[in-house]
Image (cartoon, rainbow, N blue to C red):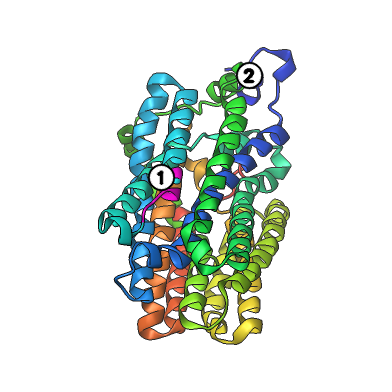
Amino acid sequence: MTETTTAGLGSDPAHKQANPGEIAIGVIIGRTAEFFDFFVYAIASVIVFPRLVFPFASELTGTLYAFAIFAVAFIARPLGTVIFMAIDRRYGKSAKLISAMLLLGTATVAIAFLPGYSEIGAASIWLLALARAAQGLAWGGAWDGMASLLALNAPKEQRGWYAMVPQLGAPLGLIVASALFAYFTGHLSSEDFFGWGWRYPFFVAFAINVVALFARLRMVVTPEYASLFESRELQPSRVLATLGHDGRNIIIGAFAPLASFALFHMVTVFPLSWVFLFTRESPVRFLIIETIGAMFGVAAIIASGMLADRIGRKPLLMGSAIAIAVFSGFAPQMLDAGPVGETAYMILGFILLGLSFGQSSGVIASSFRTAYRYTASALTADLAWLFGAGFAPLVALLLATDFGLISSGAYLLSGAVVTILALYISGLRESEEYR
């Protein structure tokens, strides 16, 4: 393979180098759509599903049940990767992406039409769990390799900058989802909101997914980008073969960002549930605080790109994990300190999240064998979300309810410790390619 083919698009002189900016746009659109879906469901798990699907339980118990179903998607996601990687190998990336996004859209719309427990009884619970499992399978298939492609084609001196681009989708998706729910809960009567208002964000999620699908297809299936995926050897490998060759690095890669993923839910889903259940404050006001905090998160993610290019990604992640460990010792109690404490908790938390989460994606990817990098990166993301995020709202709320808010800090501390250990064990020196 020649130098030109490895770096760009083969012999086509018009495409000797991929345009990182163009790839970045596709990545941001795709990730924002996915995270918007994620947060729409997460917010509904706190303020809608306990009343709609679990009216027979107390508010706290209903929220815990909703968080248990919330975790189903993360359990299903690795299975989705297995299924859709097989589709990719047999029918190509376009078939994989179209079928995954169709499943995601169908599941999301199904939730929008979900009847409540008062209408169909326990079937409402099973339908919600089924739709959530379908979302998880679809997210496994929605992995399009664009983030890996972006990392491989970014200028060497700006690897950290381009590594943070996919992560911007999280706060952007949260901003839109929180703003939508804040608007509807603030402008509709309780009867109208629980009757139809909560369903509207799920319809919006479906529409955003359609737009994102066409934007990503434009990138993935064009001959130029198909050639680029091939030249970079970003092709689906068999899952068992990938685990056999890169299983150790996949596990390390899944645990390396655990601090970021634990903090992710400690400043998004968990605080909303705590404020909603244990204070007299309106969810509207806290959703606005969450939106403001997410804006600080956007700025911190951008800053992480600049810092990573100056000091390296691994030192930044290690320093962020230590800062998160310190944060865990005092910050959760701020949620009981009124509006000022809540705002300080959210802003400081989102700044730390942005600095760590901005560089958490693919920190171990340079250790993957080239032939397995595409599938290994997908599996690493699946397991990172499963271990670090899937059960976080449920565990944090259980701990905080039984042992006080300080115990949720202990949960966050455990994530930081695991990240520090994983980075230490990996023994990675930032390579020239991913530095």
Quarter of the rendering occupied by the N terminus = top right
Q: Which residue is mark 2?
A: 224
Q: Residue at x 57, y 83 (%)?
A: 334
Identify the amino acid type marked 2.
Glu
Total marks in image: 2
Of 188 and 102, the residue lying toward us: 188
Identify the amino acid type marked 1.
Ala
Q: Which residue is mark 1?
A: 110
Q: From the viewer's perspective, tell me whether residue 14 is left or right of residue 293.
A: right
Q: Residue at x 67, y 38 (%)?
A: 24
x, y (%) of residue 290? 62, 67
Q: Which residues are magenta?
A: 109-115
Mark in the foreground, 1 or 2: 1
The quarter of the picture where residue 63 lies is: bottom left
- SS for dot 2: helix
Q: From the viewer's perspective, tell me whether residue 156 is left or right of residue 232.
A: right
The label on residue 234 is none
Q: Residue at x 35, y 58 (%)?
A: 116
